[in-house]
Structures are given as C-alpha cells and as structure tokens.
Amino acid sequence: MRAAVLGSPVAHSLSPVLHSAAYGALGLDGWHYDAHECDETGLAGFVDELGPEWAGLSLTMPLKRVALDVARDVSPLAAAVGAANTLVLTDGRRYAENTDVAGVVETLRGAPPGGRAVVLGAGGTAQATLAALRELGIADITVLVRSTARAGELQAAADRLGVAPEITDGLLDPTRARAALADADVVVSTLPRGAADGLTGVRPGAVVLDVVYAPWPTAFAAAADASGARVLSGLEMLLHQAVAQVELMTGLAPPVDVMRDALDAAVAARA
C-alpha cells in the first residue's frame, strides 16, 4: 500500500517521518509513504492516475480547499470548515476529511474555555482553527487578516460552523494587532513562515500556537515566549493531525509515542 503528502513546497515536510514510523510500529511492512510536489492545478490529475494500491493522501498548502473539488465524498466537518487535509482512497473511495481540527484541539487542550482567542491568517488552516476553538468552548474570536475583502471563504466557514468571529484587517496595522494580541488568552498563527515576524504584544500567560515549525522558534514565537506566554510549536499540531490520518488510512490505532519519538529525532537531525 502507498500513501503520500502533496503540496507546494513539500520538500520540508516531516509527514513521511510520522507516517513511516507508524507503519513500522504497526507491522505494516508493505506500506510506503512519500512526498510529491503538487499545486492546485495538478491535484485532480495526480489523483486520477493513482491505482488501487493507494490508501490516502495528506494535503498541505495550497491544496486544502481544492481537495473538496477532487473528493467524491466529504465529511460533514470538512464541508463545514471548507477545507480538507486528507483524502482517504482505500476501497476506491475519495473521502475528504479535515484532521487539522483534531491537531489544533489536541495541541490546545487545557486552554481556558470561555476565554478570548486571536487567529492570524485567513487560509484553510485558519478555517480549521475556528472549528477547533468552537470544540474547545472558545467563542470570543478575533481574526486578523491582511484584507477583509479577501476573507470571504473564512467568513463562509464561520457561518457554516456557527461561530461569529470579528474579522479585521489588523495585520496591516501594528497598533491594532498589538492591542488584539494583548487581550487574548489564546493566539493561533496560521500564517506562512515569516509572515508573523514583527508582531508583538502577546500577554504573559497566554497560550500561543504557531503552526510554522521550521525554522523554530519563529520570530513571532520567540517574542511571545519572551513576553511570558506558553508557546506551542506547529510540530505538536503536525503530530496529532498525522495520528488521525494514520487511523483513517490504515484502520488501526496509531502508536502516538513512537510517532512523537520519530518526529523529535528528525527535528534534532535537521538542527
């Protein structure tokens, strides 16, 4: 059986480390997991050419929204979020699911329910974060974007999820961004590498998740840590979303500790 992660760029992905470690621990000796460069225009053709030996695909930027168009069946969660990071292909299916939500939920587990959250960014991961915050009982949400005019898909996802975030173009205004961050109990940056550099103002004691994990720490994470926040790396989210993917693709309970150890070793080797 085969599986892979697709995206652009994808060479940096640690998903092969996580999935391969799981296969080894589960005794799935005939399973292989690779990485393939693929953009939005190439996804449908890539999937069309796959044979019956393919169990599934992990999808990263920029494929999370177009994945819904390629799928034949979409989970209610992925449909509500408006993005999928997983295509399950076993038994001829093309089933789209979103395990990013589980990744964010497990990473932020223990964050105070009923607190205030700030989300940075408007892409598919930001949409998944809205679903995760809803599950965690956090309804007071501000989303900082570059342009509210380009946040239509984010607003549509919020409407489907039944959440009502304040979406503002505060990323373009350092003063407004700083004020929002200073008032937040939970901060999740879904921005690509370097895009959150220079943002400051996170208060002491806040929980901060930066989904970027390489290089680590990011400038944003380092500034939050210096302010006294509890900072979480995107590696934790990556681990938990992969755990859910392995179970979807293999039907077996994933060995979380083995996957975590493999991930830590791979990060140390790249340092």
Image (cartoon, grey):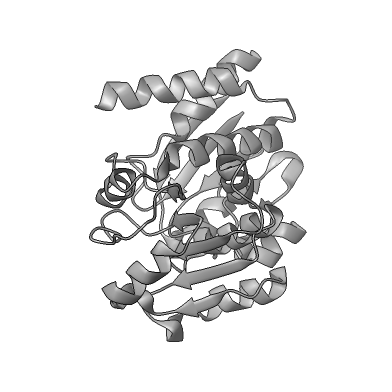
- Measured as percent of width and height from the top left, residue 108 is found at 57, 44
Closer to us: 11 or 142: 142
- Measured as percent of width and height from the top left, residue 123 is found at 47, 66
Q: 98 above or below 22?
A: below
Which of the 4 quarters of the picture holds residue 70?
bottom right
Q: Residue at x 44, y 83 (%)?
A: 148
Closer to us: 267 or 139: 139
Q: Residue at x 41, y 73 (%)?
A: 145
Q: Residue at x 67, y 44 (%)?
A: 89
Q: 230 above or below 67?
A: above
Q: Would you say 6 lies left or right of 37 here?
A: right
- Measured as percent of width and height from the top left, residue 99 is found at 62, 47
**Quarter of the figure with the N terminus:** top right
Q: Would you say 174 lies left or right of 58 here?
A: left
Closer to us: 31 or 117: 117
Res. 222 visible in picture: yes
Q: Residue at x 58, y 78 (%)?
A: 155
Which of the 4 quarters of the picture holds residue 198?
bottom left
Closer to us: 208 or 227: 227
Q: Would you say 100 lies left or right of 193 here?
A: right
